[in-house]
Image: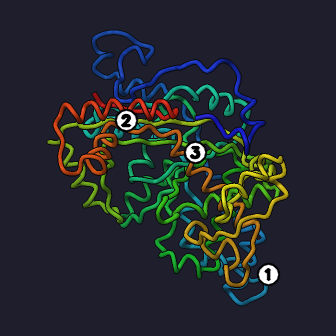
C-alpha cells in the first residue's frame, strides 16, 4: 500500500514511524466497546449509538451554482449553446443548465448520512460475513486530513456496492465522507434525491456518445470538480478497467491542478476484494431496490470483503516528476536503458493510444492530434492508479481455488491435492509481497 518510490519519492518519505501492522477492523462487528456507554440496553442499540458518535463533516451547497456559472469555460459553452453574446439573459443560460442543477446542488446532510450508514451496516450484515478494513494507512489519512490536504480516493470499479463501501469505511473511522461519483443510471427520482443529499454525484442520463457531443457536459463537470476541491471536499472516483468509465473525472482533476485553481490533491488508491463480486443492474429503480431488499430477508451472509486504503501521494508531484508515462511497445532494453542511465525524463514519450480511458471531449482527437503529451500523461496517471489499486488488493481464497481449477486442474482433482496446491500458491503470492484474504 505504499506509494511509488519512482514517481512520488517525496510522498513516500512523508511516511513516519515503523511499518507496524495495525490489523483489521470488521465494520459489521459493532460492540458496546465502540461506544461511550455500557450496559444491557447499550448492547441492544450499540450500532445506533456507534453511528451517532461518528464525526460527520457537513457540506452545505452555499453559492456553488453561481460559482459554476461564473466559470469561463461554462460561460463560453453557454454562449455557444445559445448562439448569442456572452452578456445575454442569465435566465436563458440557466435553462440550459437545468439537467445539471441536481448534480451541482449535491450536498451532505449529517442526519441523513448517519441514518443511511446505520441502514448500510444492517444490510451488509445480511450480505457478507464480514467487511475487513485494513488499518495500516488510516493514520496517514488522518494526518493528511488534519493538515488540510484534499483527498481523492480512486478504486477499480467492480460493483455498485463499491460506491457504498468506501464512504462507509471512512465514516466509521471519523474521516471526511467523500463526494462519490455514481457510475450507473438511476431511474427513480426519489432515490436520486436521497443519494444527492449524502454526497452521491449522479451525472445526467446521457450516453457516452451524447456526453461527447454535448458542449456543456465537460465544462460543467470540470467546473464542478474545481468548486468541490476548492471547498476542501474529498472525492471518490471508480475507474472501470474494461470500459475506462471514470477516467474523465480524473482528467478533470488533473486539469484543475494544472491551471492552478487548486494547489494539489492527495490521491489514495483503494483496493476492494470480494470473495464473490455482487451483481448489479445497469439501471437502478425503486422496484429493483425493493426486490433486492426483500431478497436480503431470507439470504444467508456469505463471503467477506476486504478494503485496503493505500498511502496518499501527491498528484502534482507525479505529474511534474516526468517519470509517470505510457511507453510504446519497445524492446525491454530500450525501456530499461533510460532508467539505468538516469535519463528517463529525456526519453521519447510513447505513442500508445487508449481512447477508452479518455474520450475526445477532454483532449483532441487522435487523428487530428497524433501526439498529445497532456493526454499521454493523463492516461499514464490513470493506468498508474489502476495498477496501484490492484497492487494493494488482496487475492481472496475463492480466486485461488478458481484459478487452480480453471488453469491447472481443469479435468478435475482430489481435495487433498487441491489443498496442497492452495498452500503452494499462497506461499508464492506471499513471497511476491501480495496479500491473501481468507473468509474462514
Q: Residues within 10 Å of mark 3 (few under 14, many from 20)?
A: many
Mark 2 and mark 1: Cα distance apart in space: 67 Å
Choose the circle earlier in sequence order: 2 or 1. Answer: 1
Residue at 75 percent of width and 66 percent of height: 374
Q: Earlier in the sequence, mark 1 or mark 3?
A: 1
Q: Which of marks 2 and 3 is in front?
A: 2
In which quadrant is the C terminus drawn?
A: top left
Question: For mark 1, what is the residue?
Answer: 87
Residue at image coords 41%, 12%: 37
- SS class of the residue under badge 1? loop
| Tag 2 secondary structure | helix
Give the image location of residue 201, x and y in percent.
52, 57
Looking at the image, residue 153 sits to the left or right of residue 184; the answer is right
Location of residue 154 in the rendering, given as x and y in whole percent from the top left corner: 56, 48
- Residue drawn at x 32%, y 46% as measured from the top left: 403
Q: Say few, some or many: other residues with alpha carbon within 10 Å of mark 1 (under 14 / 14 to 19 / 20 or more).
A: few
Along the horizontal axis of the image, is 397 left or right of 151? Answer: left
Q: What crowding class fits label 2: few (fewer than 14 Cα within 10 Å), some (14-19), or many (20 or more)?
A: some
Is residue 197 shown above or below 192? Answer: above
Residue under numbered circle 2: 425
Counting residues from the start of the chain, the first of labels 2 and 3 encountered is 3
Above or below, comparing residue 242 to residue 13 in the picture: below
Residue 151 position in % (x across, y down): 65, 42
**Element assignment for label 3:** helix
77 with respect to 261 (left or right): left
Residue 239: % across, % down: 52, 57
The residue lying furthest to the top in this view is 39
Residue 388: mark in rendering: 3
Amino acid at each position: 500500500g505504499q506509494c511509488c518510490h519512482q514517481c512520488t519519492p517525496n510522498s513516500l518519505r512523508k511516511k513516519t514511524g515503523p511499518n507496524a501492522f495495525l490489523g483489521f477492523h470488521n465494520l459489521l462487528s459493532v460492540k458496546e466497546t465502540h461506544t461511550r456507554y455500557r450496559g444491557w440496553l447499550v448492547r441492544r442499540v450499540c450500532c445506533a449509538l456507534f453511528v451517532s458518535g461518528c464525526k460527520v463533516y457537513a457540506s452545505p451547497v452555499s453559492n456553488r451554482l453561481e460559482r459554476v456559472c461564473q466559470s469561463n469555460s461554462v460561460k463560453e459553452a453557454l454562449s455557444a449553446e445559445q448562439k448569442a453574446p456572452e452578456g445575454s439573459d442569465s435566465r436563458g443560460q440557466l435553462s440550459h443548465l437545468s439537467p445539471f442543477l441536481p448534480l451541482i446542488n449535491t450536498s451532505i446532510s449529517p442526519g441523513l448520512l448517519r441514518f443511511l450508514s446505520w441502514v448500510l451496516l444492517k444490510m451488509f450484515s445480511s450480505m457478507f460475513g464480514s467487511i475487513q478494513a485494513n488499518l495500516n494507512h488510516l493514520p496517514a489519512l488522518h494526518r493528511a486530513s488534519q493538515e488540510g490536504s484534499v483527498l481523492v480516493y480512486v478504486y477499480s470499479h467492480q460493483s455498485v456496492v463499491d460506491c457504498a463501501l468506501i464512504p462507509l469505511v471512512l465514516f466509521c473511522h471519523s474521516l471526511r465522507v467523500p463526494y462519490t461519483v455514481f457510475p450507473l443510471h438511476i431511474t427513480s427520482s426519489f432515490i436520486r434525491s436521497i443519494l444527492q443529499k449524502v454526497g452521491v454525484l449522479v451525472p445526467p442520463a446521457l450516453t457516452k456518445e451524447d456526453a461527447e457531443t454535448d458542449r456543456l457536459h465537460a465544462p460543467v463537470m470540470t467546473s464542478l470538480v474545481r468548486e468541490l476541491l476548492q471547498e476542501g471536499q474529498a472525492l471518490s472516483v471508480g475507474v472501470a478497467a474494461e470500459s475506462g468509465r471514470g477516467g474523465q473525472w480524473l482528467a478533470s482533476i488533473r486539469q484543475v491542478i494544472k491551471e492552478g485553481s487548486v494547489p494539489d490533491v492527495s490521491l489514495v488508491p483503494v483496493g476492494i476484494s470480494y470473495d464473490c463480486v455482487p451483481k448489479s443492474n445497469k439501471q437502478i429503480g425503486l422496484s429493483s431496490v425493493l426486490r433486492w431488499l426483500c431478497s436480503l430477508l431470507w439470504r444467508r451472509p456469505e463471503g467477506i470483503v476486504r478494503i485496503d486504503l493505500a498511502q496518499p501521494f501527491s498528484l502534482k508531484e507525479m505529474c511534474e516528476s516526468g517519470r509517470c508515462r505510457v511507453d510504446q511497445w519497445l524492446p525491454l532494453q530500450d525501456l530499461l536503458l533510460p532508467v539505468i542511465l538516469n535519463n528517463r525524463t529525456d526519453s521519447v514519450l510513447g505513442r500508445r493510444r487508449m481512447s477508452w480511458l479518455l474520450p475526445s471531449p477532454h483532449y483532441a482527437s487522435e487523428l487530428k492530434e497524433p501526439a498529445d503529451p497532456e493526454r499521454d500523461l493523463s492516461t499514464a496517471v490513470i493506468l498508474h492508479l489502476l495498477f496501484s489499486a490492484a497492487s494493494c488488493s488482496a487475492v481472496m481464497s475463492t480466486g485461488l481455488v478458481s484459478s487452480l481449477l480453471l488453469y491447472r486442474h481443469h479435468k478435475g482433482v482430489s481435495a487433498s491435492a487441491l489443498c496442497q496446491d492452495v498452500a503452494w500458491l499462497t506461499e508464492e503470492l506471499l513471497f511476491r509481497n501480495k496479500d491473501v484474504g481468507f473468509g474462514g
